[in-house]
């Protein structure tokens, strides 16, 4: 009579059913994380849209309450745009203000219980970086036309084979720099708060939350400042 051995772990792992189960589980985890990010992203957009509609409905000559808050906020952003880009930067105020308000809200929402920062997902930060990237070159092409290409060719023709690849890599690296800097900082802060909350749920996470508020403003400022600098560079005439 043949010996009957119990199935080994390696035998179970090698079965098609096990691989199908593992693939489904991994796909579900990835999809669940992406779904959370999408929900948080839409929540931020809805909050900003509702806030704007509430202010528009109750506009007053003498600003009060929410209107006063938004006027101070937008005035501060407008002053920052003009100081950084000069008067030629005013047409791009709406872009910079939209990026600033959206990124800051995405950063701060992670402080609330049961929510996570939408900017701790690389998909979100990459999309924001691509907006900055394409807007920069759109502005340059619209203003200078074909002459905008001179930005990539260097001061003399014989340097073109060297300067062109360097400039292309430099501009593409801006996307990585913007997206990974924002993603890495916000992800690190969220993880630190989660770990501290799990280990010591009372009071200890509070200093980290205060730090997250501060760094949320800093990361927003860094992102919009770099975007403004890139647009200013595209506005300049190449020589």
Image (cartoon, grey):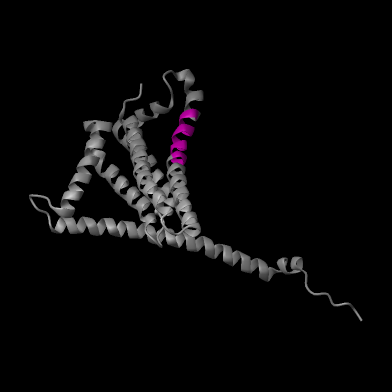
Residue 130: x and y in percent read 40, 44
- Which residue appears farthest toward the left when viewing the image? 61
Q: Nearer the viewer, residue 66 or 13?
A: 66
Q: Residue furthest bottom?
A: 1
Percent position of residue 62, x then y = 8, 49
Badge count: 0
- Residue drawn 61% across and 64% down? 23
Bounds of the magenta segment: 166-177
**190 to the left or right of 236:** right
Q: In what quadrant of the picture does the N terminus appear?
A: bottom right
Q: Is residue 36 above or below residue 85?
A: below
Looking at the image, which is closer to me, 44 or 151?
44
Looking at the figure, which quarter contains the C terminus? top left
x and y, in percent, of residue 47 in the image = 28, 58
- Say which of 74 and 131 sits in front: 74
Task: Decide whether residue 167 is among the magenta residues.
Answer: yes
Q: Residue at x 37, y 50 (%)?
A: 107
Secondary structure mostly taken by the magenta-highlighted segment of the chain: helix
Q: Is 200 inside the magenta-drawn segment?
A: no
The one of 108 and 102 positioned closer to us in this rendering: 108
Q: Is residue 23 above or below residue 124?
A: below
**191 with respect to 6 (left or right):** left
Residue sitting at x 17%, y 56%:
55
| Res 113 quadrant in image | bottom left
How far across and down, in percent of the image, does residue 218 sit?
Answer: 36, 41
């Amino acid at each position: 009579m043949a010996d009957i051995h119990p199935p080994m772990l390696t035998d179970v792992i090698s079965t098609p059913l096990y691989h199908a189960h593992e693939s489904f589980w991994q796909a579900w985890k990835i999809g669940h994380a992406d779904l959370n990010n999408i929900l948080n992203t839409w929540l931020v957009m809805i909050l900003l849209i509702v806030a704007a509609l509430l202010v528009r409905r109750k506009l007053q000559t003498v600003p009060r309450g929410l209107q006063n808050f938004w006027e101070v906020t937008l005035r501060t952003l407008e002053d920052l745009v003009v100081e950084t880009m000069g008067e030629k930067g005013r047409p791009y105020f709406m872009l910079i203000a939209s990026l600033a308000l959206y990124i800051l809200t995405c950063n701060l929402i992670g402080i609330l219980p049961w929510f996570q920062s939408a900017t701790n997902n690389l998909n979100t930060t990459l999309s924001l970086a691509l907006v900055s990237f394409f807007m920069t070159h759109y502005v340059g092409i619209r203003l200078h036309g074909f002459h905008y290409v001179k930005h990539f060719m260097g001061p003399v023709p014989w340097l073109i084979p060297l300067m062109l690849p360097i400039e292309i890599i430099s501009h593409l690296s801006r996307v990585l720099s913007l997206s990974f800097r924002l993603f890495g900082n916000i992800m690190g802060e969220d993880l630190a708060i989660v770990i501290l909350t799990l280990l010591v749920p009372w009071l200890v996470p509070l200093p980290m939350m205060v730090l997250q508020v501060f760094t949320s403003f800093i990361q927003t400022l860094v992102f919009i400042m770099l975007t403004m600098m890139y647009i200013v560079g595209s506005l300049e005439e190449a020589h």
